[in-house]
């Protein structure tokens, strides 16, 4: 068998290369976290990210994201509504680099999984033995030789784009200190349990209110794109599909009458046959 | 050889169907990070979360657009090679190399594509890789090469290539099938020494190839008779010595020298199609017919072919050219892997098989966008509406349900009666409608409504505890739609297949048989009658034989390769046609396919031209003796298996008796009957053919 990559330049050790890629991303991330003044806290996400790359754990990216989120939350968040609250200082360039390195690590690790474990999901259907023997199971993972340097270059080039977009959109999510909120939370320090619950709910609703733009944007965008692509798909049905669709529509419109008619015909035939 | 342009079939709604579990987990965690950042007003965390979410959505959009923009740009090419180059026909028993190329006719690139070729069910994979992966663009196609071997004559269908597309992270996935159908004939292998006719010299003078002596006056070289001279006879034919002895002019009469026409009548009815393709009775008959045709062609005899089944006969007139031989072989290959069909096969047995196959080969026709199954359909509209057979437990359950359902209705009726009575008693106005009439009208109306309601409740209740039945109903609707569209039924075809079990079963069998998928069939109907005796073929065969006799010349040989076992009471028309053929001085011989696994009939009967009467059970070579000789496995001694040998023995005796009766029947007319058993060499049968031709010639 020869595959597509035969005629293209290949690196035979795609797994090792992507491991190296992830290590580099983690190194850069460590430097950025140190520059942010996290002190020894920077070791936590780096370690959590390092071990799964070394052992090729599939849960690695999720663990890493969890560790990073915990670290950033613990060191940089303030609870609004508490007297004396002020938003933490932000450095846009630092955020941009941090996001880009996180994305580099996550993308590299998932690509590593595609090479080391699987890239296609398992087929949930319980097939009979015969078709399985026919060789209809495709290779579940990428051949290691298929990972070319072009992939890395494209990935590296795309990193600042996504991070930049996120940085551009973040002001709509994070309010300015003087921005009016949906609820003014005054009761969070109260000793009454009920008042604390109300306060937390108000906090949550404030957050949701801030996310309204994101939700609208994503929801409307998804619906629009989905509708557009669906319409394109209808316009390009093959002949067999179109016939099937028309037949299905006819049946759906007249299934009651057809059912009645056909059941009579069957009964009549059976009576004829005795 | 074949280049098909394929259209990808993505779903109209993007995300839920193309995102993998890995993708869903990543999206969930990224969204959580984003929400945490937003809720805690942590700009860094929000930016990181937003970056991940935007990147994911961007990848999703890119993947969806890739799939849609590449519609109609995927090409599949398939070529089959042998050691000399590309081939358009395959040969049984030989090895061929398959080359499959998947090309992308677009400037876009698919980052990761995995393909797997569908190897037909009738061929064996020898070596080579049938699966491959890589990226795909205009310059870099994906290529597979492997070798196959075709064990049996017939047709092989290369349906196409399974293709899976994914992004490099494994977040998105699209799997489908590229239908690139290539159907090739597997021709019978050309015989060498085995298929050649016997060349032992039986006469002092052998006519040239393709010419045979016929004992009728003609212009041959062998003396047939002497007769008195008639005016006009050529002088060179006068036998002078004999004339001198008898003192009158005597003329020599010579034999005719004519070509021998051999017509092979091959049975292709369901009775010979039973069993695995390639090792059933039909394959055996085709093997014999092929060898006979080749041997005839090698001897420059003319060979014709007539394929007979229950409905019709397909005839190829005798000829002797190599092109004609290839035409015969192609015709035989076309019918070699026909599958048996019966309308009595239960639909529910065929549905899982057909649906699993359709999921593999026609996934784009099972999409809900074009082949929708309403969710309520299996619950409220079980298929078919008419004549559903219920089990005894179901029968009792139904009665119990209606009994229980009657109790609330009775209460309702009493309440109605009470209400009407109360209303009539307390009404200040004169009564216009009699109370009884009003009561009856209300009860009838309520009863109909209640009955209709309870029917729905009963159907839903019975479906509630039968997930398998619901699944089968869904599959049946989807497959009925596919089959109805495929075989061009009228717009009402879908509804007809949902209601008519027999029709649905026949079309599902046709669908499976077309794709060479083996399927189980019952041998006997509910009354215990054998379903595959195919008595209809006798009439068709008799008509075909009569037509061949009507168009025949001198010296025709009709070889009937037909399964007529246990059809004694239907043989009348055929016997009459055979008598007509014999009366016209043609030769008829009969080759009976023998069921695989059944011991051969006793030898002592086989070569007797006029067998004596006797029963197979008591004849020499009966199963008891064959078992003693080791031909049949010894009787198993376990109690549970004790019945099996007895059944085998009974079946064997039945076959032997049927064969004996058949042979007796034809022997009365001087028609030899040969048993085409599984292990018997083709050479032996050809030898017999030759010998019988000689026997016929001396008559």
Image (tube, rainbow, N blue to C red):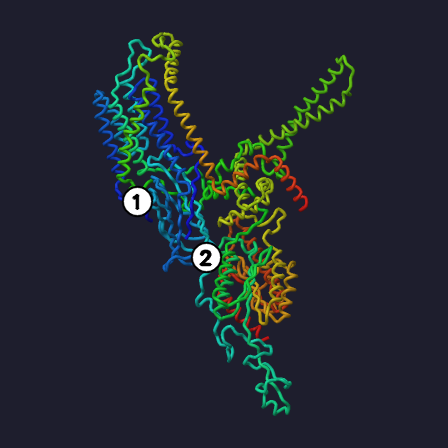
Indicate the quadrant where residue B254 lies. Answer: bottom right
Q: Nearer the viewer, residue A195 or B11?
A: B11
Residue B10 in view of the camera = yes
Q: Count neighbours of disc 2 (C-alpha within 10 A) and say few if under 14, some if 14 to 19, many if 20 or more.
A: many
Residue B535 image offset from top left, x and y in percent: 62, 56
Residue linked to disc 2: B186
Give the labeled residue for mark 1.
A5
Q: Position of residue B411 (x, y in %)?
A: 68, 22
User: Where A268 falls versus B591 (above or below)?
Assistant: above
Tell me the subunit letter for badge 2: B
Number of disc labels: 2
Chain hosting mark 1: A
- Residue A122 in sight in this render: no
Percent position of residue B88, x then y:
43, 57
Vertical position of residue B461 compared to residue B669: above or below: above
How far across and down, in percent of the image, does residue B244 sit?
61, 92
Judging depth in this view, the residue of B207 and B620 nearest the camera is B207
């Amino acid at each position: 068998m020869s595959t597509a990559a035969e005629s293209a330049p290949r690196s035979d050790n795609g797994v090792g290369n992507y491991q190296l890629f992830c290590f580099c991303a983690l190194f850069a991330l460590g430097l950025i976290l140190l520059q942010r003044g996290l002190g020894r806290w920077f070791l936590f996400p780096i370690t959590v990210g390092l071990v799964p790359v070394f052992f090729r754990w599939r849960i690695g990216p999720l663990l890493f994201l969890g560790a990073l989120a915990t670290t950033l939350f613990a060191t940089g968040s303030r609870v609004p509504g508490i007297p004396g609250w002020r938003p933490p200082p932000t450095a846009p360039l630092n955020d941009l680099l941090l996001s880009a390195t996180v994305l580099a690590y996550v993308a590299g690790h998932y690509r590593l999984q595609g090479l080391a474990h699987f890239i296609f999901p398992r087929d949930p259907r319980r097939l009979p033995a015969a078709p399985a023997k026919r060789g209809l199971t495709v290779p579940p993972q990428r051949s290691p030789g298929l990972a070319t340097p072009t992939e890395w270059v494209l990935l590296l080039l795309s990193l600042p784009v996504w991070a930049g977009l996120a940085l551009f959109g973040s002001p709509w999510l994070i309010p300015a200190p003087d921005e009016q909120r949906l609820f003014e939370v005054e009761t969070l320090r109260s000793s009454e349990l009920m008042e604390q619950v109300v306060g937390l709910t108000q906090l949550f609703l404030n957050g949701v209110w801030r996310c309204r733009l994101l939700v609208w944007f994503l929801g409307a965008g998804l619906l629009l794109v989905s509708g557009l692509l669906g319409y394109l798909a209808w316009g390009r049905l093959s002949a067999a599909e179109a016939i099937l669709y028309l037949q299905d529509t006819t049946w759906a419109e007249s299934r009651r009458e057809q059912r009645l008619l056909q059941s009579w015909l069957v009964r009549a035939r059976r009576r004829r046959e005795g | 050889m074949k280049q098909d342009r394929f259209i990808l079939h993505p779903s109209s709604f993007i995300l839920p169907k193309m995102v993998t579990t890995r993708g869903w987990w990543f999206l969930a965690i990224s969204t959580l990070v984003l929400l945490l950042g937003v809720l805690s007003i942590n700009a860094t965390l929000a930016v990181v979360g937003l970056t991940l979410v935007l990147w994911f959505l961007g990848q999703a959009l890119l993947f969806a657009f890739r799939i849609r923009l590449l519609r109609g740009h995927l090409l599949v090419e398939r070529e089959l090679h042998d050691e000399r180059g590309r081939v358009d026909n395959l040969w049984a028993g030989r090895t061929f190399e398959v080359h499959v190329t998947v090309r992308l006719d677009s400037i876009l690139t698919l980052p990761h594509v995995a393909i797997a070729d569908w190897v037909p069910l009738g061929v064996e994979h020898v070596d080579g890789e049938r699966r491959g992966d890589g990226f795909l663009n205009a310059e870099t196609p994906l290529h597979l090469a492997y070798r196959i071997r075709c064990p049996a004559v017939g047709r092989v269908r290369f349906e196409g290539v399974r293709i899976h597309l994914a992004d490099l992270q494994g977040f998105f996935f699209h799997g489908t099938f590229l239908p690139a159908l290539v159907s090739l004939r597997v021709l019978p292998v050309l015989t060498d020494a085995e298929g050649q006719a016997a060349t032992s010299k039986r006469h002092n003078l052998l006519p040239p190839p393709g010419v045979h002596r016929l004992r009728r006056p003609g212009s041959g070289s062998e003396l047939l008779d002497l007769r008195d001279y008639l005016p006009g006879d050529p002088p060179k034919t006068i036998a002078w010595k004999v004339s001198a002895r008898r003192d009158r002019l005597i003329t020599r009469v010579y034999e005719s020298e004519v070509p021998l026409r051999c017509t092979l009548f091959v049975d292709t009815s369901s009775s010979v199609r039973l069993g695995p393709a390639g090792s059933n009775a039909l394959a055996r008959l085709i093997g014999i017919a092929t060898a006979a045709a080749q041997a005839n062609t090698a001897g420059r005899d003319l060979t014709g072919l007539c394929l007979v089944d229950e409905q019709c006969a397909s005839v190829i007139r005798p000829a002797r050219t190599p092109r004609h031989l290839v035409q015969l072989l192609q015709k035989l290959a076309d019918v070699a892997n026909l599958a048996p069909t019966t309308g009595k096969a239960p639909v529910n047995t065929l549905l899982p098989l057909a649906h699993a196959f359709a999921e593999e080969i026609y996934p784009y026709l099972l999409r809900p966008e074009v082949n929708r199954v309403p969710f309520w359909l299996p619950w409220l509209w079980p298929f078919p509406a008419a004549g559903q057979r219920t089990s005894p437990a179901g029968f009792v359950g139904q009665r119990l349900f209606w009994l229980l359902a009657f109790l609330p209705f009775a209460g309702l009726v009493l309440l109605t009666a009470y209400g009407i009575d109360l209303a009539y008693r307390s009404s200040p106005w004169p009564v216009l409608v009699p109370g009884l009439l009003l009561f009856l009208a209300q009860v009838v109306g309520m009863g109909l409504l209640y009955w209709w309601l309870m029917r729905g409740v009963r159907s839903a209740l019975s479906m509630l505890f039968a997930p398998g039945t619901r699944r089968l109903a869904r599959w049946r609707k989807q497959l009925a739609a596919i089959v109805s569209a495929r075989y061009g039924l009228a717009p009402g075809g879908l509804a007809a297949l949902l209601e008519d079990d027999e029709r649905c079963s026949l079309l599902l069998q046709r669908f499976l048989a077309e794709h060479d998928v083996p399927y189980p069939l019952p041998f006997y109907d509910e009354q215990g009658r054998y379903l595959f005796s195919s008595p209809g073929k006798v009439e068709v065969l008799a008509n075909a034989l009569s037509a061949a006799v009507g168009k025949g010349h001198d010296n025709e040989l009709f070889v009937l390769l037909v399964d007529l076992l246990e059809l004694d009471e239907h043989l009348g028309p055929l016997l009459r046609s055979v008598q007509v053929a014999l009366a016209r001085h043609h030769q008829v011989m009969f080759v009976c396919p023998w069921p695989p696994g059944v011991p051969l009939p006793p030898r002592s009967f086989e070569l007797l031209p006029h067998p004596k009467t006797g029963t197979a059970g008591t004849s020499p070579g009966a199963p008891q003796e064959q078992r003693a000789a080791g031909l049949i496995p010894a009787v198993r001694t376990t109690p549970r298996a004790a019945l099996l040998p007895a059944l085998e023995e009974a079946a064997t005796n039945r076959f032997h008796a049927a064969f004996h009766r058949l042979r007796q029947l034809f022997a009365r007319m001087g028609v030899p009957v040969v048993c085409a058993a599984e292990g018997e060499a083709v050479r032996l049968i050809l030898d017999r053919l030759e010998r019988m031709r000689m026997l016929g010639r001396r008559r």
